[in-house]
Amino acid sequence: MQRLTLEQAKQLNSTMVTEDHLLLHAANVSAAMGAMAEHFGAGPEEKEEWEAVGWLHDYDYEKYPDEHLEHTEQPLLEAGVPERDVRAIMSHGYTIVNDVKPETPMEKSLFTVDELTGIVQAAARMRPHGITDMKLKSFMKKWKSKNFAAGCNRDLILQGCDMLGMEIRDVAGIVIDGMKAHAEELQLAGDGEEA
C-alpha cells in the first residue's frame, strides 16, 4: 500500500507555502504526529506517513486563508497523494470548515494536535531552555490559563481528546516529547536567557 513520504509532503507543501511561521507550524505538527503514531504502535513507514500528513495539512492555507481546505483535496489527489492521507488532511477541518469527521487514529490525532502544538510552542518560547527541559506540569499551568495563547482553540483540542478517548495531559505529554526530539529544527532549543 502506497504511503505519503515526508520528502513528498515537503516538496508538495513548498509549492504553496512560503511563510516562515506556516512552515514552522508544519514542522511542529509533523513532529507531534510522529509521536502520536508511536503512541498508537506505528512502524517506521507508518510513522513517516503520519509525519508527512502533519507536514502537509495546511497545504492551501497561505494562498486561500478564507477558503481553507477548499483547494486541497483535488490538487493533492492529482499529485498522487493516497486518498487515505488526503482524507486525514481534510478531517482536521471538521466542524470548522467542513463535515469530514475524523475516524481513524491518524485523523483524530491531527485534529487534536494542530491547535495543541501552538500552545506548546508558545509555552516553550517563554523558557530559557525552550522545550528541552519543559515538564508536563508546567505546560498544564499554561494550558489552564485561558489568556495564554488565547488564539489556540482549547475547545477543539478537548473535542479531539474526546475522540481519541484520552486526557489532555496524556496527549500533551506525547506532543511535548515529540517536539522535544526536534527542538533545534522547531527553534525551541532556547537561548539560556529568561524570556
Image: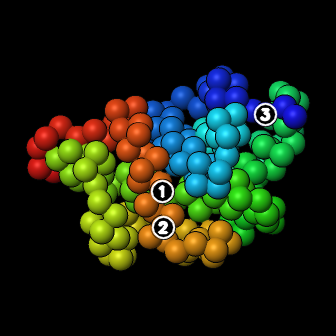
The kind of residue tagged 1 is Ile
Q: Which mark is residue 147?
A: none
The kind of residue tagged 2 is Asp
The kind of residue tagged 3 is Arg
| Label 2 with label 1: CB-CB less than 8 Å | yes
Element type at marker 3? loop
Q: For the image shown, how many numbered marks are present on the structure?
A: 3
Q: Which mark is residue 174?
A: 1
Q: Position of residue 88 (x, y in %)?
A: 75, 51
Q: Is residue 93 visible?
A: no
Task: Classify mark 3: residues with Cα within 10 Å, few (<14), some (14-19) or many (20+).
Answer: some
- Vertical relation: 2 (above or below) 139: above
Q: Which residue is mark 2?
A: 170
Label 3 to label 1: alpha-carbon separation: 23 Å
Marked residue nearer the N-terminal end (3 or 1): 3
Quarter that holds the N terminus: top right
Q: Which residue is mark 3?
A: 3
- Vertical relation: 22 (above or below) 148: above
Label 2 to label 1: alpha-carbon separation: 6 Å
